[in-house]
Every structure is written in C-alpha cells, then in structure tokens.
Amino acid sequence: RAPASTDLRERVLEINRAYFGNEHPEVAMSLFQLARGAAEAGDRAASADYYRQATDIYSKIFGEDHEKTRKMRQRYVSAAAAAANLNEVARKNSSFTSKSSQALSMYDEQRAGALFPEGMVADNRQLP
C-alpha cells in the first residue's frame, strides 16, 4: 500500500493532467514530486520512470538544451543508474542474499529467545 503522501501526489498529477493536458510544466512538476517520493520510499525504478516522464515533457516544452530539461535529465540518469546498480547487485548476490536471510532468521530466533524468556512475548501483551 502506498503512503498517503504518494496517494495525494498521484491525485495532484491526475488533476494537473485533466486541467493542463499531458505536456505542461505543472504535470512535469507533479511527476518530479512523485519521483522524489518514490526515491524516498526506496523505489528507485519508479523514481527513474517518473523522472523520465518529466524529462520528456520538459524536452518537448523547453527543448533539449534548456536548463530545466538538463537538470531533470540529470536526475533521471542518476535515478536510472541507481535502479540499474541495485538490480545488478541483487542479481549478482541472489545466492548470498538467500544465505544471508537464512542466517539472519536464525540469529533473530536466537536473539528473541534470549530477550524474551518463556512466558513473555515480543509484543509485550504478556508480561511476567
């Protein structure tokens, strides 16, 4: 489930598209806000896609060499590179990640046993 701020940003984008059309600076700014929100939430692929869409709009409106287009393109390239790097790391380390998850699970179970002796539960519903 998307956070409320993302829902609000998506609604603003819908309104701006309905009012201004698909290729307007206000639509690009809505996409920029969604890109920032996605990046903050750790969704690098969505962030890159929103930046790409905003870049396309600025390119059509202002031209390829305009400062706004160049800045948005830089953000898009950075976000796309981060998403690609993350995917590559995940792909290369999938077996490591699987083994790490298993080890962390075992560690968490041992730690939980030490922190919460019999008769106690981790969510503090029962206390001795």
Image: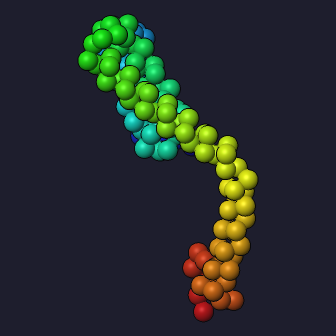
Name the residue nearer the viewer: 101 or 13: 101
Task: Give the quadrant of residue 105.
Answer: bottom right
Q: Which residue of the protein is positioned furthest toward the front in this rendering?
A: 92
Q: Residue at x 44, y 27 (%)?
A: 77
Total marks drawn?
A: 0
* Nearer to the camera, 56 or 16: 56
- Outermost residue on the bottom side: it is 128
Whole-percent x and y of residue 121? Answer: 64, 80
Q: Is residue 42 left or right of residue 100?
A: left
Residue at left offset 73%, top offset 65%: 102
Q: Nearer the viewer, residue 7 or 80?
A: 80
Residue 80 located left or right of residue 19: right
- Name the residue: 35% across, 23% down: 72
Check the image and report above or below for 78 versus 40: above
Q: Residue at x 32, y 19 (%)?
A: 70
Position of 68 with respect to 14 (left or right) is left
Q: Is 5 drawn above or below residue 70 in the view shown? A: below
Residue 9 visible, this orientation:
no
Q: How is the image coloured?
A: rainbow
Task: Please tell me which residue lies in front, 17 or 23.
Answer: 23
Position above or below: 73 against 109: above
The image quadrant where one finds the C terminus is bottom right
Which percent across, then down, holds residue 64? Answer: 34, 10
Residue 104: x %, y % from top left: 66, 68
Figure quadrant of the N terminus: top right
In percent of width and height, residue 15 lies at 40, 20
Can the viewer see residue 56 in this picture? Answer: yes
Q: Is 113 positioned to the left or the right of 23 in the image?
A: right
Q: Quadrant of residue 89?
A: top right
